[in-house]
Image: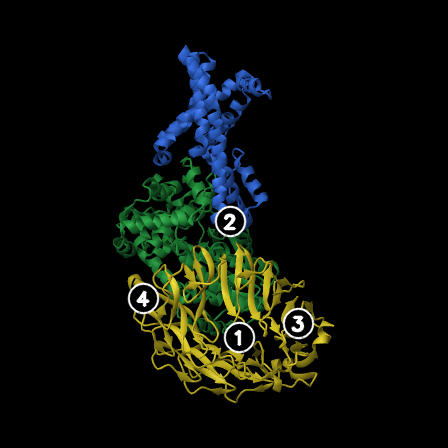
């Protein structure tokens, strides 16, 4: 790994923030802040604000703080101080410039990864506080442009990438056809009512990585799973509205998703290798709709692979030879405790696995999650430079392949590997399984 | 809906087709569908590489094959439809006959209640529209979502994009580039979003969920938004026989029901959706969460006292409007809930409850340990099958049409209800 | 002398009652306020609370070096635990305090030998000094610190400093005694209405996140 000499922070110009802030009036700012803080927050907010003793012990949790030479303004509590802290201090009388800056802090300097919640002796959830800031910024219309556009895509199409309804189905049928080259009677059963499993993915898969759908089709068919994929909107389980603070839209997206599973009468939803989407169906969107947990048993791909390998439904022909390491995605390790299952799966399919440290719940975030990568090009350099610790951690493993079962982690890690010139390639678990598993004609 | 009075209620058991035999004739046989009267069973079948057909009661639909075929479904009046592709053109095939119009893509067929109308969404040359009974919209659009067909099958509608939207142009989006197209004619007004919609009884009025900006939700009727806005709304419906619109709305942090913009239930819920009028049009039932994580049904604002943890869905009114039945999920086990009483037996899956014509009985298809049967009035029938379709009561309510698969064979049976619950 | 007597009578008479009223009443009020917020706005929290995972989380965080972050900051950890341990226990079991209570209400309990109490007092003073120095010297703590943080260190140190001085008859005993009682009263009264309220809230924030991590996220929170 090399240390980039250019470490200056670029000027960030984000039209979403500039134009949004230009439309603000002092009255609207104050009313909105009051409405959110008094109308929408409750005991958690009050307890967090009043309990924090400014001890700074959360600092070491944050990859941004650690990467930016321990600059205290990037510590979790530092970010609260710069946003909620100032709002409270000034009794809500903050100006448009402040809102713009607060939006940058909450949307691009915090991944809502919740590592700091594990470092605060009181268990203060700084991610929640940053979401409150994002909520205020959303209500004021001052959200970074690219992630706002993604939220718009969700609203218009119920998917993240403006994928039109026919494009989605067409992609599935195209992958099905391609996969029949390998397994002649393979199917991606569409809208099969009463299937055991509904498989759901995020929109970047049909848009940019359809081969991941292909891989899963091979796995499903080999394992003999009674599965289906939906043709109707609701197929995309991703959710940037959850990260822009548009809670109403987040709820609407999850309603479409769960309604679809209910119509298809499936017993379980299996999700592709995505972290934030898992968080959204498992922990966030369900609550916004009034569900304590997901109404359907919803499992992340890691758990699915684990079950398939454990029960012998898929068998390994020959383990993957290249040396691999694992980046634990926050939303499925710290968010769902799947880190040990991920390791078990990787050890089943790979010969040479090296840990990176810290790991499991204590992993460093990729710095792309929490909607940060979705804030787009204006923040790319800042995003990679503010995760130097991740680069160092990854480089130390010396592995050839970086496995990470999460789309945002992939984007984040690809950028980091490129920026710090680390000779390593990212892979999803399904790509390796597809390479090493016994397929029907070999069985 | 086909009149079930004309069906064969006299024959006790008919072996319609041996499905295992089909498997030897084709590369693969996809999941079967049966006609409402149970006389037919059909599957999409693969004949050869990239060659598909539809097999009905053991006979193929036609001599020519399709390059692709999917979404095989029976209409309520018993016609068999599929989305098919020949020579890179998609269309709808009905009982083996393709529509004259072809498309670059066609999907999401919707049927009218009587089955007389079939509507699909389509894309042609990158533009989007709907086609009803082989008649496509004249005006096409940049995109199309949330399609709807009027109950009488005379009108189609969908959300359409009426202005170009550049990449990441969030400001134009927020000015509004969407509207609803009523039979292909867009409303005069534009909105930030338009979602699910409903027609009134004669198709003359169209109501839709809309978002006026990023924050204010309401209902628009024929393009005219309600005077009041809400924190959120769900799909509206019309009060039967009237032009009044009823929708779930979120106000002051709670969900309730509004009619024409005015809140009509004095009670608020953590969640409320899938509101439904009784057949006599006098009652409104809705699925509600009276407290966080607990679900039940509320009729005219009064929630049943029994609640369940995970989900209530597939709600139906009895024909005499006196009862409401739904399926209920908790801890991965489904059961039925009828007028607030949960049935004791639980299942791995339960399907939409079906009332007898006199409203005295309610039955549902249920699944347990990979075997299927029926549950009737709280009892599970002791016969188990490899597969069954929804039960159908005879017009006199004395018999149930059981469409079942056993040992690879499809049977149509007429079984006295007394025998089932005996 | 008369002035001292008047003051002494004031701080040991009406002010004691006022202190207990404010401290206990204020604490009850603050906790009730928190629960009323939960009941009115975040009732869902109850459905995630788990006794098992609350205790699991507490057990890790009340034991020195049982969490990753405690291990990362050994000096801070030792000082934090010693400070809080002595801060709470020493005043409760100090012979002089127990004697006063016995004289007033006729109840008494075990007491600490004076030597140990004296050491514990010094630990609290040293702890306060440590926190103060930490606030000045550590960049990430200095950045977060506001004026009230320094005042709070002073408030918590004051009764121990004055008690120490009074006990050892350094400076004017009577004055120190009065200041000791007064500063103790100020500290108690400050608890519900300042950041000292972490004494009241910590158990709720800790057990809530412990429950979320344990029963929903199936992950450790330490």
Dot 2 and dot 3 within a common chain: no
Q: Residues within 10 Å of mark 2 (few under 14, many from 20)?
A: some
User: Residue B5, percent across and down?
Assistant: 62, 85
What colour is chain A? green
The residue pinned by badge 4 equals: B176
Residue at image coords 43%, 24%: C157
How far apart in space, not on screen, are marks 1 and 3 (Cα)? Answer: 37 Å
What colour is chain B? yellow
Is residue A435 positioned above or below A396 on the image?
A: below
Image quarter in which the N terminus of chain B is found: bottom right
How far apart in space, not on screen, are marks 1 and 4 (Cα)? Answer: 47 Å
The residue pinned by badge 1 equals: A184
Label 1 close to label 3 by CB (< 8 Å):
no
Q: Which mark is residue B374?
A: 3
- Total of numbered circles in the picture? 4
The residue pinned by badge 2 equals: C43
Label 2 close to label 4 by CB (< 8 Å):
no
Chain of the residue under label 1: A
Is residue B261 positioned above or below C66 on the image?
A: below
Q: Is residue C5 left or right of residue A10?
A: right
User: Residue C125, percent across and down?
Assistant: 44, 22
Q: Which mark is residue A246?
A: none
Q: Secondary structure at mark 1?
A: loop
User: Residue B417, percent across and down?
Assistant: 70, 76
Chain of the residue under label 3: B
């Amino acid at each position: 790994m090399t240390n980039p000499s250019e470490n200056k922070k670029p000027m960030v110009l984000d039209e979403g923030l500039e134009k949004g802030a230009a439309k603000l009036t002092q009255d609207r700012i104050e009313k909105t802040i009051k409405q959110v803080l008094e109308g929408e927050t409750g005991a958690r907010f009050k307890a967090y604000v009043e309990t924090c003793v400014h001890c700074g012990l959360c600092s070491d949790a944050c990859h941004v703080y650690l990467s930016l030479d321990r600059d205290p303004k990037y510590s979790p509590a530092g970010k609260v101080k710069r946003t909620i802290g100032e709002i409270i201090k000034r009794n809500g009388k903050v100006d448009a410039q402040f809102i713009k800056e607060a939006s940058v802090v909450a949307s691009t300097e915090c991944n809502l990864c919740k590592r700091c919640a594990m470092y605060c002796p009181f268990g203060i959830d700084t991610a929640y506080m940053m979401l409150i800031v994002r909520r205020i910024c959303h209500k004021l219309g001052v959200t970074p442009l690219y992630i706002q556009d993604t939220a718009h895509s969700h609203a218009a199409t119920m998917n993240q990438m403006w994928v039109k309804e026919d494009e989605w189905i067409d992609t599935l049928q195209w992958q099905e056809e391609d996969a029949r080259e390998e397994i002649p009677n393979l199917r991606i059963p569409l809208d099969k009512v009463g299937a055991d499993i509904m498989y759901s993915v995020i929109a970047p898969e049909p848009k940019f990585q359809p081969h991941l759908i292909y891989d899963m089709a091979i796995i499903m068919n080999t394992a003999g799973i009674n599965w289906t994929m939906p043709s109707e909107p609701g197929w995309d389980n991703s959710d940037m509205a959850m990260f822009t603070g548009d809670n109403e839209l987040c709820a609407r997206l999850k309603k479409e998703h769960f309604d679809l599973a209910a119509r298809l009468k499936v017993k379980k939803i299996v999700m592709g290798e995505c972290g934030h989407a898992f968080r959204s169906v498992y922990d966030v969107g369900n609550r916004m709709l009034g569900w304590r947990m997901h109404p359907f048993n919803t499992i992340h791909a890691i758990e699915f692979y684990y079950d398939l390998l454990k029960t012998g439904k898929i068998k390994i022909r020959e383990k993957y030879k290249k040396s691999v390491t694992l980046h634990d995605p926050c939303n499925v390790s710290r968010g769902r405790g799947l880190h040990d299952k991920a390791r078990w799966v990787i050890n089943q399919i790979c010969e040479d696995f090296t840990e990176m440290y810290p790991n499991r719940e204590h992993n460093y975030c990729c710095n792309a999650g929490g909607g940060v990568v979705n804030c787009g090009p204006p923040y790319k350099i800042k995003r990679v430079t503010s995760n130097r610790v991740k680069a160092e951690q990854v480089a130390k493993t010396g592995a050839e392949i970086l496995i990470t079962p999460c789309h945002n982690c992939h984007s984040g890690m690809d950028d980091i590997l490129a920026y710090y010139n680390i000779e390593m390639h990212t892979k999803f678990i399904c790509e390796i399984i597809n390479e090493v598993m016994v397929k029907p004609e070999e069985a | 809906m086909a009149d079930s009075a004309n069906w064969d209620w006299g024959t006790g058991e008919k072996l319609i087709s041996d499905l295992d035999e089909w498997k030897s004739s084709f590369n693969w046989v996809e999941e079967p569908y049966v006609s409402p009267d149970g006389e037919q069973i059909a599957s999409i079948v693969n004949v050869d590489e990239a060659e598909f057909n539809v097999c009905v009661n053991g006979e193929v639909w036609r001599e020519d094959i399709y390059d692709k075929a999917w979404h095989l479904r029976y209409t309520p009046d018993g016609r068999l439809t599929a989305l098919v592709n020949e020579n890179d053109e998609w269309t709808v095939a009905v009982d083996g006959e393709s529509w004259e119009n072809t498309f670059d893509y066609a999907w999401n067929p919707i049927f009218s209640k009587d089955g007389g109308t079939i509507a699909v969404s389509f894309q042609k040359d990158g533009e989007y529209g709907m086609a009803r009974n082989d008649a496509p919209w004249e005006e096409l659009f940049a995109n199309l979502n949330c399609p709807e067909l009027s109950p009488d099958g005379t009108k189609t509608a969908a959300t359409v994009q009426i202005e170009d939207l550049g990449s990441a142009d969030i400001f134009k989006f927020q000015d509004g580039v969407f509207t609803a197209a009523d039979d292909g004619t867009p409303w005069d007004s534009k909105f930030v979003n338009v979602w699910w919609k409903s027609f009134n009884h004669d198709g003359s009025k169209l109501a839709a969920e809309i978002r006026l900006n990023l924050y204010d939700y309401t209902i628009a009727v024929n393009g005219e938004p309600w005077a009041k806005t809400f924190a959120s709304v769900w799909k509206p419906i019309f009060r039967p026989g009237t032009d009044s619109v009823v929708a779930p709305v979120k106000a002051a942090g709670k969900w309730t029901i509004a009619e024409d913009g005015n809140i009509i239930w004095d009670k608020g819920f953590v969640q409320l959706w899938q509101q439904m009028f009784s057949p006599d049009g006098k009652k409104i039932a809705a699925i509600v969460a009276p407290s966080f994580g607990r679900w039940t049904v509320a009729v005219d604002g009064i929630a049943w006292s029994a609640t369940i943890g995970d989900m209530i869905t597939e709600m139906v009114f009895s024909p005499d409007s006196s009862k409401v039945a739904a399926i209920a999920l908790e801890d991965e086990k489904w059961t039925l809930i009828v007028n607030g009483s949960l049935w004791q037996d639980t299942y791995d899956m339960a399907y939409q409850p079906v009332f007898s014509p006199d409203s005295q009985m309610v039955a549902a298809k249920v699944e347990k340990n990979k075997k299927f049967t029926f549950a009737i009035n709280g009892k599970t029938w002791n016969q188990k099958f490899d597969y069954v379709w929804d039960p159908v009561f005879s017009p006199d309510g004395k018999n149930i049409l059981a469409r079942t698969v056993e040992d690879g064979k499809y049977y149509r049976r007429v079984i006295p209800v007394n025998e089932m619950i005996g | 002398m008369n002035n001292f007597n008047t003051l002494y009578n004031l701080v040991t008479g009406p002010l004691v009652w006022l202190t207990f009223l404010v401290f206990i009443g204020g604490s009850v009020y603050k906790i009730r306020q928190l629960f009323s917020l939960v009941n009115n706005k975040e009732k869902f929290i109850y459905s995630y609370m788990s006794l098992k995972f609350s205790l699991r989380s507490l057990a890790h965080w009340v034991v020195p070096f049982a969490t990753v972050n405690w291990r990362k900051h050994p000096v801070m950890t030792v000082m934090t635990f010693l400070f809080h341990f002595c801060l709470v226990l020493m005043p409760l079991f100090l012979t002089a305090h127990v004697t006063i209570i016995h004289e007033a209400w006729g109840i008494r309990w075990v007491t600490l030998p004076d030597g140990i109490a004296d050491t514990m007092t010094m630990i609290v003073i040293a702890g306060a000094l440590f926190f103060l120095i930490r606030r000045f010297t550590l960049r990430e703590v200095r950045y977060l610190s506001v004026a009230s943080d320094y005042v709070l260190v002073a408030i918590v140190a004051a009764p121990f400093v004055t008690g120490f001085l009074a006990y050892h008859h350094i400076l004017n005993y009577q004055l120190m005694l009065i200041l000791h009682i007064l500063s103790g009263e100020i500290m108690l009264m400050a608890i519900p209405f300042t950041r000292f309220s972490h004494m009241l809230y910590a158990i709720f924030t800790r057990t809530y996140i412990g429950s979320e991590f344990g029963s929903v996220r199936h992950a450790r929170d330490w």
